[in-house]
Image (cartoon, rainbow, N blue to C red):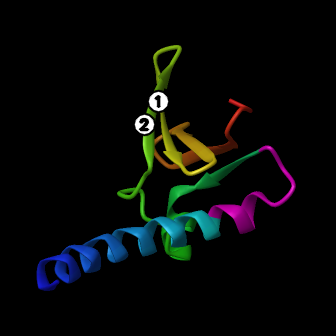
């Protein structure tokens, strides 16, 4: 039980970061299918680029997944977010 509890705490921390990222993007994207945001703005809102749920490659571009969103770097300072199926 103790080992399970320790492992569960590690997962909870990661899941909390993922969920926080998800909530930030969900609030910002609203009814749009895609948005482009400044990385400093996202970091200021509490977004962490370190936590993703999956990784995809399409047409030599790398897309990072966050549940039903995906995102890619547009420039050194800008990131574009999509609702999956719209990229």
Q: Name the one closer to the observer, 38 or 4.
A: 4
Q: Residue furthest left?
A: 3
Residue found 84% across the figure and 50% down from its top: 32
Q: Kindly indicate the quadrant of the structure image that contains residue 50.
A: bottom left
Q: Name the one closer to the observer, 45 or 78.
A: 45
The boundaries of the magenta stretch are 25-33
Q: Residue furthest front?
A: 1
SS category of the residue bearing label 2: strand
Residue found 28% across the figure and 76% down from its top: 8
Does residue 4 show up magenta in the picture?
A: no
Residue found 27% across the figure and 80% down from its top: 9
Q: Is residue 68 left or right of residue 72?
A: right
Q: Quadrant of the N terminus?
A: bottom left
Q: Is residue 37 left or right of residue 64?
A: right
Label ID, residue 56: 1
Location of residue 31 with respect to 65 vertically, above or below:
below
Label ID, residue 31: none
Residue found 53% across the figure and 66% down from its top: 21
SS category of the residue bearing label 1: strand
Looking at the picture, how far across and down is residue 73, in whole percent? 50, 39
Q: Kindly indicate the quadrant of the structure image that contains residue 42.
A: bottom right
Looking at the picture, how far across and down is residue 18, in whole percent? 47, 65
Q: Label 2 belongs to which residue?
A: 55
Looking at the picture, how far across and down is residue 3, in whole percent? 12, 78
Location of residue 75 with respect to 25 vertically, above or below:
above
Q: Is residue 43 left or right of residue 83?
A: left
Q: In this view, does 79 lie to the left or right of 54?
A: right
* Crowding at mark 1 (Cα within 10 Å: few <14, some 14-19, many 20+): few
Q: Circles 2 and 1: CB distance less than 8 Å?
A: yes
Give the spatial CA distance, label 2 vs label 1.
4 Å
Location of residue 74 with respect to 44 vertically, above or below:
above
């Amino acid at each position: 039980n103790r080992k399970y509890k320790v492992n569960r705490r590690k997962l909870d921390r990661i899941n909390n970061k993922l969920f926080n990222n998800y909530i930030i993007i969900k609030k910002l994207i609203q009814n749009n299918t895609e948005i482009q945001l400044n990385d400093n703005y996202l970091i200021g809102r509490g977004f962490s680029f370190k936590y993703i749920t999956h990784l995809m490659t399409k047409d030599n571009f790398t897309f990072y997944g966050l549940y039903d969103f995906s995102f890619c770097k547009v420039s050194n300072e800008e990131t574009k977010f999509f609702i999956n199926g719209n990229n």
